[in-house]
Image: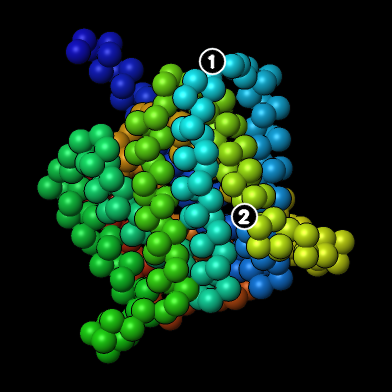
Amino acid sequence: MTATDSVADRRGALKGHAAMLLFAAAISVSFSLGDRAAELIAPEALNALRFGIGALVLGVIAALGPGLSRGQLAAPWRYPLLGGIFAVYFVLMFVALALAEPVSVGTVFTLTPAMAALFGWLLLRQRATPRMLLALAIGAAGAVWVIFRADLDALLDLRVGRGEAVFAVGCAAHALYTPLVRRLNRGEPPLAFSFWTTASVCLVLVAGSAATGSLFATDWAALPPIVWAAVLYLALGATALTVYLVQFATMRLPAAKVMAYGYLVPSFVTLWEALFGFGPPPAAVLAGVAATALAMLLLLAED
C-alpha cells in the first residue's frame, strides 16, 4: 500500500466516523419520539409508512445523484434479505418501547457492537484487537447494568424486562445487517443501495402489516399530532438519513467500529429526555450510561 493509498484510507475512515457520529445523534431521537407514539399505533403500520416516505425521499435523491439503474438489481434477492432483517429490528424496537423506558431500550442498543464484531468475524473474518475486545466488554457491562436498572438482585436473578428482552433480539438483527451490507454490496453507490434496501424494508412491512390487519385497521385521520411528528422524523431523520449513513460508514470502517457509535445512543437519549422535560434517569443508571460512552472512546482510540 502506497502513502497516497494510506492517506486516502485514513480520510475515508474519518468520513465514516463523522457519518456515524451524526447517526448516533439522529437515531437517539427516535427512541424518545417513538416512546410517545408506540402505544398509539401498531408498530408494523407505523414503520411501513415511515419506510415508504423514506424510500420515496431516497429514491428522488438517488435518481438526481448517482442514478438508479437495472445493473443495481443484479442478484435482487439481496435487498429483500437486508430489508427483512432491518424490518425485524425496527418493529421490535417499537414493541420494546411500549414495554420499557426509552433510556433502557436505547442502552440495549449498545449490545450491537459486540454482536456486530461476532457477525463481522463470521461473515468477513474481521478480527477484533485486544483494545476492541476490552471496549466491547466494558460497553456490554454498562448496557447490562442499565438493562437490569442498576438492581444487583435483579442481575443476580437474571430478571430481564420484557421490553429489553424483545429489543435484544432486534439488536441482533441490526448487528447482522451491518456486515451483511458490506458482504452483499457489489459496488453500487451508497445512495442507490440505500434506496433499494429501504424500498425492500417498506415492502416487507406493508406485507406484514396487511397480513396482521393493522395497516387497514389504523384510523390514520384520527391519529394525534405526536404520531405524525414521529412518522415524519422517523422517515427522514431515522430512516432515509441513518440507512445512508450506516451504509456509507460500513464501506469505510470495520463492522464493530461502525456499531461502536451505538454506545453513544444512551447518552443522547438521556440528553433528549432531559430536553423534553422528563428529567435524567437515576444516578446509578447513569453510571452504566457512562460506561458505554467510555467503551466507545476505547473502541475508537486507535483512530
Identify which amino acid the numbered label 1 is placed on: Gly
Q: Nearer the viewer, residue 282 or 96?
A: 96
99 on left or right of 211: left
Badge 1 vs badge 2, beta-carbon distance below 8 Å = no
Residue identifier under label 2: 208
Q: Residue at x 44, y 59 (%)?
A: 170
Q: Residue at x 67, y 50 (%)?
A: 206
149 on left or right of 276: left
Q: Label 2 neighbourhood size at 10 Å, few (<14), some (14-19), many (20+)?
A: some
Marks 1, 2: nearer the viewer? 2
Circle number at residue 210:
none
Q: Nearer the viewer, residue 129 or 164?
A: 164
Position of residue 288 measured from the top left corner of the image (x, y, whole percent): 33, 70
Residue identifier under label 1: 71
In this picture the colour scheme is: rainbow
Q: Label 1 neighbourhood size at 10 Å, few (<14), some (14-19), many (20+)?
A: few
- Image-quadrant location for residue 177: top left
Q: Residue furthest bottom?
A: 153
User: Distance between the Cα atoms at labels 1 and 2?
Assistant: 28 Å
Mark 1 and mark 2 lie on one chain; the one further toward the N terminus is: 1
Q: Residue furthest right?
A: 221
Position of residue 210 measured from the top left corner of the image (x, y, whole percent): 69, 55
